Amino acid sequence: MQELFVEGGNRLHGELTIQGSKNGVLPVLAATIVCAGECRIENCPRLRDVDASIAILRHLGCCTRWDGGALLVDTTHMDKNEVPDALMREMRSSVIFLGAILARRGEAALSYPGGCELGPRPIDMHLAALRALGAEITERGGTLRCRARVLKGTEIVLPLPSVGATENAILAACGAEGVTTVYNAAREPEIAELQDFLNAMGADVRGAGGSIVTVAGKRALHGGTHRVIADRIVAATYLCAAAACGGEVRLLGVDPVALSTVTAALYEAGCRVESEADAVALQSAGSLRAIPPVRTAPYPGFPTDAQPALMAALLRSAGSTVFIENIFENRYRHVGELARLGADIRVAGRVAVVSGVGALHGASVRCTDLRGGAALVLAGLQAEGTTRISELEHIDRGYESIERKLALLGAKIGRREETLWQEQDETEDAEGEGFPSS
Ligand code: EPZ
């Protein structure tokens, strides 16, 4: 097992090109199987969740290989319809393969994706959308079996603008006869990215980014090339790090519009933010102030995935900030670990109140989930002394080498095999512990 160790106190400076989006590339990888052909996915991030998707593609009979920063996927010889339990357990968002397999093969099976650290994570809307298109879905012994002799275009109204359900509906609709219209579709930038990729394959998807998306199905599809958009949540994470630590950073390749609710919050907290066409720069004195209540909401509202990072940035702010988590039932699991570093956070249901403290102090903490783990790193960057962070598999699902990226900005952070925690000899230079020379 590996662990991060963070020496707090450094300001952050410099430029960073932001990695490809995890939540953008996962539906794109599922979309490659909608037709037989070769696809080239450029700017594909090296993440555990991408590895899990590659394992599923290979299990289904596809071939994949890396070509530098691009992932090549050949779905010509796909010969299976089922995602096995072990692979489903590796990544619950594999449910996104359901619609694509159904569109390609007319039948699909996968084990019921369990809940995760954030709560039960139901898929009722996914299944309702597939049934509306004509799929017969049975569930037996934890396995979902979907069969559709014919998928027919129809009107689908989502009760909530669910990202995954929108993506599954669009993917399945590509295999349906006629036009499908999805109402109350999610408006996240990753939906527009899926539309762009499908249309590069010859599909006819329109309206992504808005609440009504149409798909003209059964088009003659072929392999396509796509460049993955920058990860707006990773960008938000590094902006929050610089806001909390103080300094000046410039993130390249990002769409400032996709970050606007996060940069607005950091501006309120006292940072200076400058947006360019595909970059965002932030300056911070490192002493933030509390901000008005933060309510997470579907895009274009404040992203739930950035809630833990913003919370971490405000741990030493002047005053108290109220967070209201409206998307997931259980997205404050990082609070207990932040408290070990000295944070003052009170949670009652979906509400968390963060009261700034004078100082945080290094401690041993463990990641509870992907974004909560990143929040622990941000808290460690501010803490006096050294923080040890374990269970990094959560962070590695969505952040490409978080320690290397933050070290490039001047953070004192490194990764090593987990060891019993030995008090460091006072004379020993922390750098001797593998900290990169800053
Ligand atoms: C996507 O998850 C993202 N994951 C999540 O990012 C993100 O937090 C979420 O969208 C919201 O933006 C990927 O894209 C891989 P939802 P998803 O369906 O699709 C409820 C991260 O950290 N719901 O929009 O699962 C659901 O329980 C991850 O990168 C139903 O009730 O999210 C939740 O309360 C975490 N029934 C709400 O809707 C359904 O059938 C929004 O979920 C589907 C969802």
Image: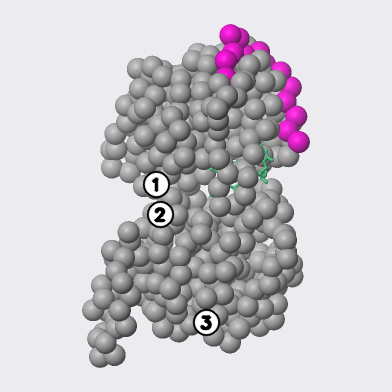
- Residue picked out by circle 1: 48
Q: Is residue 185 left or right of residue 88?
A: right
Identify the residue at horizontal 44%, vertical 57% (top origin). Answer: 395
The front one of 136 and 272 is 136
- Residue picked out by circle 2: 393
Does 310 sit above or below residue 320?
A: above
Q: Judging from the image, what secondary structure is the residue with disc 1 in?
A: helix
Q: What percent of the width, then of the height, locates residue 435? A: 29, 74
For the magenta stretch, what is the residue range?
Answer: 146-159
Identify the residue at horizontal 55%, vertical 27% (top origin). Answer: 141
- Circles 2 and 1, Cβ within 8 Å, touching? The answer is yes
Q: Earlier in the sequence, mark 2 or mark 1?
A: 1
Does 94 sit above or below residue 427?
A: above
Does 302 sit above or below residue 281?
A: above
The front one of 302 and 122 is 122
Is 425 colored magenta in this rendering? no
The kind of residue on which mark 3 rests is Leu
The kind of residue on which mark 1 rests is Arg
Q: Earlier in the sequence, mark 1 or mark 3?
A: 1
Q: Which mark's residue is nearer the viewer, 2 or 1? A: 2
The kind of residue on which mark 2 rests is Glu
**C-alpha gap between disc 1 and disc 3:** 30 Å
Can residue 18 be seen from the camera position used here? Answer: no
Within the displayed image, which quadrant is ligand 1 positioned in?
Answer: top right
Does 404 sit above or below residue 161?
A: below
- Residue picked out by circle 3: 360
Q: Quadrant of residue 125?
A: top right
**C-alpha gap between disc 2 and disc 3:** 25 Å
Q: What percent of the width, then of the height, locates residue 343? A: 58, 77
